[in-house]
Every structure is written in C-alpha cells, then in structure tokens.
Image: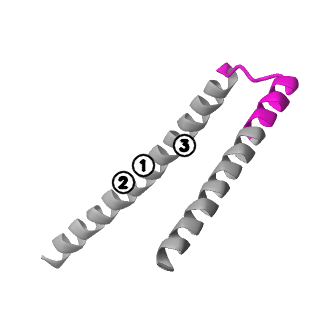
Amino acid sequence: MAAKFLKSKDSEQNKRSEKHSSSSKKKQNRIVRWWKSTVGELRKVSWPTPQEAWRLTKVVLVVVFVMAAILGLLDFIFSRVIAALVTL
C-alpha cells in the first residue's frame, strides 16, 4: 500500500515538473513570438525625416504652451471668483 502511495506521489511530481517546464517553454515562445512580431511591425512604419520630426515637435510644444497658458488663466480667474464668493 505504501509503495503504491509513493508511486502515485512520484508520478504527480513528474507531471508537475513536466507542466512547469512546458509552461516555461510556452512563455518563452510567446515572448519570442511577440518580439518578432513587434520588430516586424516596426519595420513597416514610415518614419518621419529629421526635418519633419523637428517641425512636429515644435507644433506639439507650441500647442502645449498655449494650452498651459489658457488653463493657467482659467485657473486664475476661477480662483478669484471663488475667493470673491467666499468673502461675501
């Protein structure tokens, strides 16, 4: 009876180790497959020229500064209005 129990315990451990090793292989294959597909997609991208990149960067910076100024102005106005309402 004890030998049968030990046999079944050993076979369970072997199954677990097989599952663990196969799952690590599957994970590695998923990662490798993901990496290869990512590199393949990046090769399809039409990258901007340095001049286009600088022009677009300048556009983004201008938009960010304009939005920051507008939001700062609105914050200032609303804080003054709320301060005036609180003092009433």
Q: Badge 1, how many Cα within 10 Å: few under 14, some, many 20+?
A: few
Indicate the quadrant where residue 42 lies.
top right
Find numbered disc 2 in the image and state the secondary structure of the residue it sits on.
helix
> Which one is nearer the viewer's eye here, 33 or 11?
33
Find numbered disc 1 in the image and state the secondary structure of the residue it sits on.
helix
Tell me if label 1 and label 3 are in contact, CB under 8 Å.
no
Is 73 displayed left or right of 87 in the figure? right
Colour mode of the rendering:
one colour
Give the label, 2 or 3, closer to the camera: 3
Q: Residue furthest right?
A: 51
Mark 2 and mark 3: Cα distance apart in space: 18 Å
Residue at image coords 47%, 52%: 24
Is 72 rendered above or below residue 45?
below
Q: Main secondary structure of the magenta part?
A: helix
Identified by mark 1, the residue type is: Ser
Is 47 displayed left or right of 31 in the figure? right
Is 71 displayed left or right of 83 in the figure? right
> Which one is nearer the viewer's eye here, 67 or 78?
78
Q: Residue furthest left?
A: 1
Residue at image coords 47%, 78%: 88
Is 48 rendered above or below residue 11?
above
Identified by mark 3, the residue type is: Ile
Residue at image coords 71%, 51%: 69
Report the magenta residues as a range: 44-60
The tag on residue 39 is none
The tag on residue 19 is 2
The tag on residue 22 is 1
Identified by mark 2, the residue type is: Lys
Tell me if label 2 and label 1 are in contact, CB under 8 Å.
yes
Tell me if label 2 and label 3 are in contact, CB under 8 Å.
no
Find numbered disc 3 in the image and state the secondary structure of the residue it sits on.
helix
